[in-house]
Image: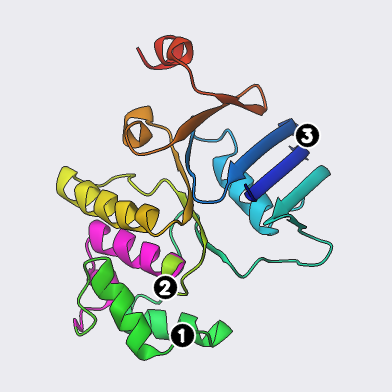
Amino acid sequence: MLNSIRLENISLAFKGKQIFGNLNLKIKKGETIGIIGANGVGKSVLFKIICGLEKANSGKVFINDTEIGKKEDFPRNIGILINEPTFIPIYSGIKNLLLLSEINHIIDENEVRECMVKVGLDPDNKTILKNYSLGMKKKLAICQAIMEDQSIILLDEPFNGLDFSTMSDIRSILDALKKEGKTIVLTSHHQNDLDSFCDKLYFIDNQNLIVFTDELREKYFS
């Protein structure tokens, strides 16, 4: 089966601190993968490396078996949420998304509207971003990551700071994407956020990724 994402011997040091050392990862097409780790261990940096936004000191990144940095610098089939997107606070949700849609000119206004409805937002809501709740901002951020029908979705801490009701809404959105066959990679510093949803869990430890086991669960989360 085709690997959507393949990392080979990724090493990165930043300001004298080793972040990753010979990290390897394979994610098959259609898999949902969770990456667990404390704040500051490099979860967001790993996403940037996958997208070509951050260059590793050594190693190779392949998206759909195409090496990034060779034939392709930024894969267009990746939707990404890292931290909080920089939306314009005095614009409505749909106005922000329409501005972003003009970058690639792949989708029209109707498709933007459909995606907003898909994540539980009203495209006709004139509320400006600075008055959005945290849950609404998170849904809008996910919308910008998926609205161009990307086949690979990277979401950094999608559940962070959300109440139970909004977390349930986000899970429903992700369940729908999973059923569509999307390759999804999520991060969290709480293993319970990802446990029941992901096909496989990894843990960032000692500058590398290791499969999350019951032993690790007992060691770090009991």
Q: Are marks 1 and 3 in contact (CB under 8 Å)?
A: no
Mark 3 or mark 2, whichever is nearer to me: 2
* Residue nearest the observer in this picture, 18 or 20: 20
Q: Which residues are magenta?
A: 125-145
Magenta stretch: dominant secondary structure: helix
Specify whether residue 13 is in view.
Answer: yes
Task: From the image, tell me which residue sits under label 1.
Answer: 107
- Mark 1–mark 3 Cα distance, whole angstroms, equals 43 Å
Which comes sooner in the sequence, label 3 or label 2? Answer: 3
- Mark 3–mark 2 Cα distance, whole angstroms, equals 38 Å
148 sits left or right of 190 in the view = right
Name the spot of residue 8 as percent of width and height, x first: 77, 39
Task: Determine whether the residue tagged by mark 2 lies in a helix, strand or loop.
Answer: loop
Question: Looking at the image, which residue is at 49% across and 50% down?
Answer: 30
Question: Mark 3: which amino acid?
Answer: Gly
Question: Looking at the image, which residue is at 47% across and 33% down?
Answer: 200
* Residue nearest the observer in this picture, 9 or 189: 9
* Residue nearest the observer in this picture, 72 or 14: 72
Question: Mark 1: which amino acid?
Answer: Ile
Name the spot of residue 48 as percent of width and height, x first: 63, 53
Task: From the image, tell me which residue sits under label 2.
Answer: 147
Question: Looking at the image, which residue is at 59% across and 43% down?
Answer: 27
Task: From the image, tell me which residue sits under label 3.
Answer: 16
**The C terminus - image quarter:** top left
Q: Residues within 10 Å of mark 1 (few under 14, many from 20)?
A: some
Q: Are marks 2 and 1 in contact (CB under 8 Å)?
A: yes
* Residue nearest the observer in this picture, 30 or 208: 30
Question: Mark 2: which amino acid?
Answer: Met
Residue 54 vertical placement versus 105 (above, below): above
